[in-house]
Amino acid sequence: MIDHNKIEQAVRLMLEGIGEDPEREGLKDTPSRIARMCEELYSGMAENAKTHLSRTFTVDSSEMVIEKDITFYSMCEHHILPFYGKAHIAYIPDGKVVGLSKLARTVEVFARRLQLQEQLTGQIADALMESMNPKGALVMLEAEHMCMTMRGVKKPGSRTMTLAKRGVFETDPALEERFFRMLGH
């Protein structure tokens, strides 16, 4: 899916555009390195979260499951600069659960695309609801955005928090309160 030639051409043009010589020793291999990096950073474009969430296990319990502090790295689609932080996921099973590593893999699928944090949060919650059919899902992301840290307002340390609630989390405020108590927030 990644077109290495187009990326290399674009990087050469960008280097020329900022007044650099793409043929100088330190930059000569940069277009190729950037193309290979894009393969990794945007690997989520070719992945489907259902692949990770389709393997479930039957349970009798319908108690809340929380996976917290899932580290993620993504790229802002507005400035193509990184944003990174922690994802916290909760769901109420309805007869089936998924392996805990699959929740982290689901975060990765959506984070490894050009993204908006608000959109990323909702995509994770929607994928859980569509693939697992739980009674409800709640996803909270807290992230630092390099577009606010190294450019623009230059406010390092500021974090953006987003929340997506689905199913019973939308109708039962006590569940959301319990989630935040369990997170320690």
Image: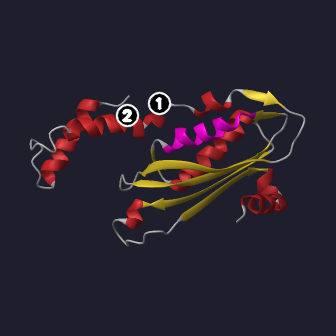
Q: Is residue 168 left or right of residue 185?
A: right
Specify the principal SS of the magenta part. Answer: helix
45 or 89: which is nearer to us? Answer: 89
Q: Which mark is residue 164?
A: none
Q: Name the amino acid type tagged 1.
A: Ala
- Give the secondary structure at mark 2: helix
Q: Residue at x 47, y 30 (%)?
A: 46
In the rendered structure, does residue 149 fall within the stretch colored magenta?
no
Q: Is residue 106 above or below residue 118?
A: above
Residue under circle 2? 39
Q: Is residue 161 left or right of residue 134?
A: left
Q: Which residues are magenta?
A: 98-111
Q: Position of residue 75 (x, y in %)?
A: 42, 50
Residue density around tag 2, few if under 14, some if 14–19, many if 20 or more, within 10 Å: some
Q: Residue at x 46, y 48 (%)?
A: 74
Q: Position of residue 19 (x, y in %)?
A: 11, 55
Quadrant containing the C terminus is bottom right
Q: Name the amino acid type tagged 2.
A: Glu
96 or 165: which is nearer to us? Answer: 96
Q: Is residue 85 above or below residue 60?
A: below
Quadrant containing the N terminus is top left
Q: Is residue 64 left or right of residue 147?
A: right
Q: Position of residue 11 (x, y in %)?
A: 21, 43
The chosen color scheme is: secondary structure
Q: Are marks 2 and 1 in contact (CB under 8 Å)?
A: no
Q: Position of residue 62 (x, y in %)?
A: 87, 42
Q: Which mark is residue 46?
A: 1
Q: Residue at x 54, y 64 (%)?
A: 160
